[in-house]
Amino acid sequence: MAAKDKNLANSFNLSMSNHTAIVMNKVLQIYKGFEGLTQVVDVGGGWGTNLKLIISKYPRIKGINFDLPFVVKDAPNIPGVEHVGGDMFNKVPNAEVIFMK
């Protein structure tokens, strides 16, 4: 449904981005598992908020934000993050680490 309703899609993605920022900021205060990594794929990453926050703390990481094409086409440009559209049930980009929230 969100794919057909631009306002609904934007509201949903903004809500997810705001929630993600709250959670990931807490995670990054405690979790050290991103140290030493060079590439991370976020499956279902929406507008790339997780990767934006991760890369701001670990700038050596190359981020791949993977979500449906209609989602990533509206994602903001984020240095160090490549937005890739696709279907996780068909194929996910290769990376050192793949995660989903």
Image (tube, grey):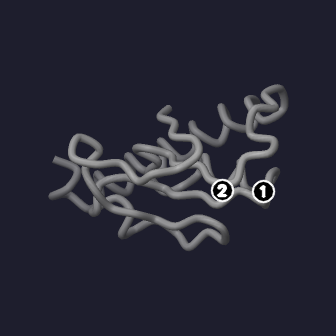
Residue at 78%, 28% in the rendered image? 31
Number of marks in picture: 2
Along the horizontal axis of the image, is 12 left or right of 96? Answer: left
The residue at 70%/54% (across/down) is 38
Q: Position of residue 65 (x, y in %)?
A: 49, 56
| Foreground of the two, 5 or 33 | 33
Q: Position of residue 85 (x, y in %)?
A: 33, 61
Task: Answer with left or right where residue 80 lies relative to residue 17.
Answer: right
Residue behind mark 1: 56
**Residues at circles 1 and 2 in contact by the CB criterion of under 8 Å:** yes
Q: Which residue: 34% across, 58% down?
A: 71
Residue 76: image location, x then y, percent: 52, 69
Helix, strand or loop for disc 1: helix
Q: CA distance from mark 1 to mark 2?
A: 6 Å
Relative image position of residue 54 (x, y in whole percent): 71, 48
The quadrant in which residue 60 appears is: bottom right
Residue type indicated by callout 2: Lys
Relative side of 35 to 61, left or right: right
Above or below, 75 against 93 in this view is below
Residue, disc 2: 52
User: Is 90 in front, or is 16?
Assistant: 90
